[in-house]
Image: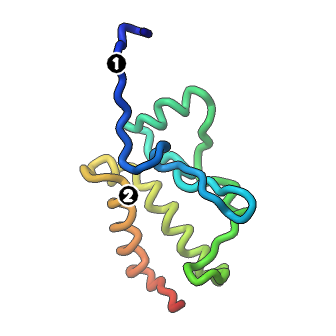
Amino acid sequence: MENGILDVRILEAEERIGGRTHSVPFGDDVVDLGAQWVSGSVGNVVYEMANPLGLLEEGRPSAIANMLFLLANGTVPDQNFLGRLVNISFAIMEEQDAMANYTGPFGQYFLDRYAKMCQKVSVHYDA
């Protein structure tokens, strides 16, 4: 009994623990999926927990230059094309004011904005 708490119930949306992050088998090793960055600081419980511990960096992740991106068919995308998609993703995550006024889940906001911005700049790929 800590802080007067006698009973705790943990709810998960999936049949596994971990929320957005989880490890999956990949060859002879594992790969961690999900939650690569924290988006938004206002009303974000993850930000409120991680920031005081010095676990967050401001701006775009520097490690993106070392990441390998693959298309659904397993091929490496054209770097120019990939750069445009990555820039769109970061532009959306920098829309703090628009996100603050959005009442739905961030994932849906991101997908809606991503689709609109890709159409706006004529980003498409025929695999």
- Above or below residue 17? Residue 53 is above
Q: Residue at x 33, y 60 (%)?
A: 108
Mark sitting on residue 106: none
Give whichever of 56, 87 is nearer the camera.
Answer: 56
- Tell me the quarter of the picture where residue 33 sits: bottom right
**In the image, residue 20 lies at what x, y percent?**
47, 50
Q: Which residue is mark 2?
A: 107
Please say if 22 is above or below 76: above
Q: Residue sitting at 41 percent across and 69 percent down?
A: 114
- Relative horizontal placement of residue 3, taking residue 67 as reference (left or right): left
Decide if residue 53 is on the left or right side of residue 114.
right
The one nearer the camera, 33 or 93, is 33
Q: Which residue is mark 1?
A: 7
| Vertical order, 20 against 127 (above or below) | above
At x 42% / y 9%, what residue is drawn?
1
Q: Residue furthest bottom?
A: 126
As drawn, is 96 to the left or to the right of 75? left
Secondary structure type for disc 1:
loop
Q: Is residue 87 above or below residue 16?
A: below
Kind of residue indicated by mark 1: Asp
Which quarter of the image is occupied by the C terminus?
A: bottom right
Q: Answer few, some or many: residues within 10 Å of disc 2's Cα (few below 14, many 20 plus, some between 14 and 19).
A: few
Residue in the image at 38% along x and 43% along y: 12
The residues bearing labels 1 and 2 have C-alpha atoms spaced at a distance of 32 Å
Question: Going from the N terminus, do you reach mark 1 or mark 2 first?
Answer: 1
The image shows residue 83 at horizontal and vertical percentages of 61, 73
Q: Of helix, strand and loop, which one carries label 2?
A: helix
